[in-house]
Amino acid sequence: MALFGSDEDKKVKKESAETEKAWNCVSNLGGAEATFVWRIEKFKVVPWPKEDYGDFFNGDSYIIYNQRPDPENPDAILQDVHFWIGKESTQDEYGTAAYKTVELDTLLDDAPVQHREVQGHESTLFKSYFPSITIKNGGCATGFRHVEPEKYVPRLFLFHGSKKNIQVKEVPLQKSSLDSTDVFILDQGLRIFQWNGETCNKDEKFKAVQYLQDLKSQRHGKATVECLENNDTSESHDFYSCLGDEPKDEEDESDGNAEGFEPCLWSLSDKSGTMEFSKVCEGEIMRSSLDPNDVFILDNGKECFVWVGSKASPEEKKNGLTYAHNYLNKTEHPLIPVSVIKQHGKEPSSFAANFS
């Protein structure tokens, strides 16, 4: 343990990271703008097909890397690496995703900002990488990948939101899933229905049409599409015959962002000889409260940041994200995004905005 965090330790970890073939596309990228996605499959990092970028299975965990020019410095690039956790993903899968995220960060000389993303609570930055995000049920263990349309398992997708923030997710194949304020697509492989709720908005309709075009392209034009309006469609229509009558399971929406939450700052320090986690302040937070010798966790109720001081001990650096995760699990907003910020690194504006 004496070598942990030392230059020799970093060298060994980087050499190990260089043996991971999945990272080759990033290490040879140069300064080009790019996004890459990998899925964790049996403890291995497997490239995700580019045509499926933005599609995630709730039983899986993924790693996403993005780099782009820095608008404030044309000669620099901004780098971010995220691990995304599906709500049905196993602990082994998201543990591997978290470990491999650190490995990729090490390979890139600690330049990227690391992020934890949880299904349904993704950060604005994460969402910006994809035209839309679609959540499907299942995962790599179920074999849900590129099924032939003739053998396709029927699925019902919800389109909800406005403008660029349209949520697309698979919902139970039940009549009770339908909501007159939203748009739905029933995908039967070679026959596809778009169901427009009576009070749905134009943005939901537009996103659904885009989604339909992609599906038709994937089915090589063999699929037929029918658009239905729920205010003038009888339940004797074929659309409803594919839907069951069981009530849908109510999802717990209590884990969202905390409204009216007072921002707070916590310190993680082992200078006493034991690891201590203590609250520094609440409400008004001053940048002067950050000490280069320690790690700090800043929670504003919508995002959580792990700030790593340049002189923090190896154990403090190692445990920052774990303490943030455990701390959030005891709050009313355990699923909010978490980002790891290194002192003297490029700070996201969302972090800097927290200080008075």
Image (tube, helix red, strand yellow):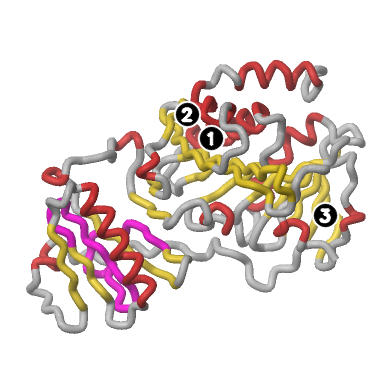
Q: Residue at x 73, y 40 (%)?
A: 320
Q: Position of residue 290 (x, y in %)?
A: 87, 50
Residue located beneath label 1 in the image:
97
- The answer to which of 13 and 330 lies nearer the viewer is 13
Is 85 placed above or below 265 here? above
- Nearer the observer: mark 3 or 2; the answer is 2
- Label 3–label 1 contact, CB within 8 A: no
**Amino acid tagged 3:** Lys
- The answer to which of 193 and 284 lies nearer the viewer is 193
Q: Residues within 10 Å of mark 2 (few under 14, many from 20)?
A: many
Q: Position of residue 218 (x, y in %)?
A: 23, 47
Residue located beneath label 2 in the image:
45
Magenta part of the protein: which range?
Answer: 167-192
Is 163 placed above or below 225 here? below
Residue 90 seen by the camera: yes
- Nearer the observer: mark 3 or 1; the answer is 1
- Label 1–label 2 contact, CB within 8 A: no
| 90 left or right, relative to 51 | right
Q: Earlier in the sequence, mark 3 or mark 1?
A: 1
